Amino acid sequence: MNPVNTKPYELPPDAVWLITGCSSGIGREIASLVASKPNQRLIATARNPSSLSYLPNTNPNILKLAIDVASVGSVDAAFAAGAKHFGKDFCLDVVVNNAGYSLSGDTEAATEEEIHEEMETLFFGTARVTVHAIEVMRQAKDHRGGLVFNISSLAGLCGFPGHAYYHAGKFAVEGFTESVAREMHPDWNINFCIVEPSGVNTNFEGQSKVHTKPHPAYAADDMPSRKLETFVNKATGSSVVIEPSAVAGTIFTIASRGECIPLRLPLGVVAWKLARSKFVDLLGELDTVKELSVMGQAI
């Protein structure tokens, strides 16, 4: 299997960052952090560019753009605008695919429109921005490589009741990213990191979370989805919830520390523990079905 991220990544002193979903939460914190660094250049994007007013308008190192990752034309236009703003030798060094929202609720109640909109934003949007970024990175004249952070979630590793299509989108992002990472020639030095935070203290429960219409068959308090909702509501605001500024700081540290990039990074105590528990349990399950799996073949 082709290895990934085999060389240490050196963040250029004048790196260009493109970040999606900068209106709030993790995206806003990463954009603010990059904007505070001397000589780092930033393309900050959001569906509504007025939500980027926290960034200065007079700094030539900062470009604020409207982008809808669910629109091919919008993504094309954003990359073209970035190239125009930063010049003909435009190099894209770091991409943070952060745009997204959660679709939660009873899976039977989800409409076709809700399902397709969720997958279009979470998966196809991430994929089209990633592919654009790879093209720019590998064609750069100085061949300085690049780094793509795809913001997944603990939901990209573990499935919980009441979020089936959100999990589907994040699982898709993880499989896509791992596959694309293995397509890269080592000489290109194009690196990928799947970031998997657990609960983050953002407005994710507000404008970034869509609920399906409740289904009466799943309304009882003893249903798994209702139990999870109760647990999550109690955990909101607790010490296990990660601050978005901490996520932003970790992402910048990974990009700037001059070491090999981890392909996967669970963030937060909850994410790390549950990720480890899942893989330990999976090893046990593999042992249980070993005889069925190998079908008499020698191992």
Image: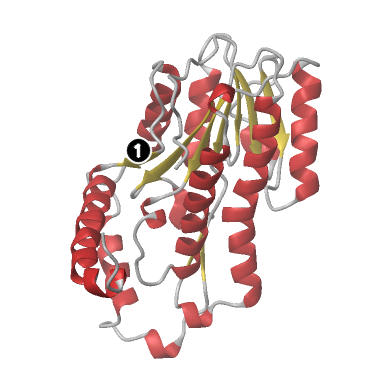
Residue 291 in the figure: left or right of residue 39: left
x%, y% of residue 248?
A: 42, 31
The residue under the point 36% across, 52% down is: 154
Observer-nearest of 127 and 188: 188
Quadrant of the rendered image containing residue 45: top right
Locate the N terminus and report the quarter of the image it occupies.
Answer: top left
Mark 1 residue element: loop
In this rendering, does residue 24 appear at all? no
Percent x, y of residue 93: 59, 23
Vertical order, 9 against 20 (above or below): above
Looking at the picture, tell me which residue is in the foreground, 206 or 186.
186
* Residue at the spot 64% in from the left edge and 76% down from the top edge: 112
- Above or below residue 66? Residue 40 is above
Crowdedness near tag 1: few (<14), some (14–19) or many (≥20) residues, C-alpha within 10 Å: some
Q: Using the rendered view, name the quadrant where residue 252 is placed.
A: top left
Asked if 31 appears above or below 279 in the picture, the reply is: above
Location of residue 263 in the rendering, given as x and y in whole percent from the top left corner: 41, 37
- Seen in the picture, residue 65 relative to 83 is either above or below; the reply is below
Q: Is residue 267 left or right of residue 96?
A: left
The answer to whether residue 39 is seen in the rendering is: yes
Look at 49% across and 63% down and name the residue there: 168
Amino acid type of the residue that numbered disc 1 sits on in the rendered structure? Glu
- Number of marks drawn: 1
In which quadrant will I find the C terminus? bottom left
> Camera-side residue: 137 or 108?
137
Quickly name the residue at label 1.
243
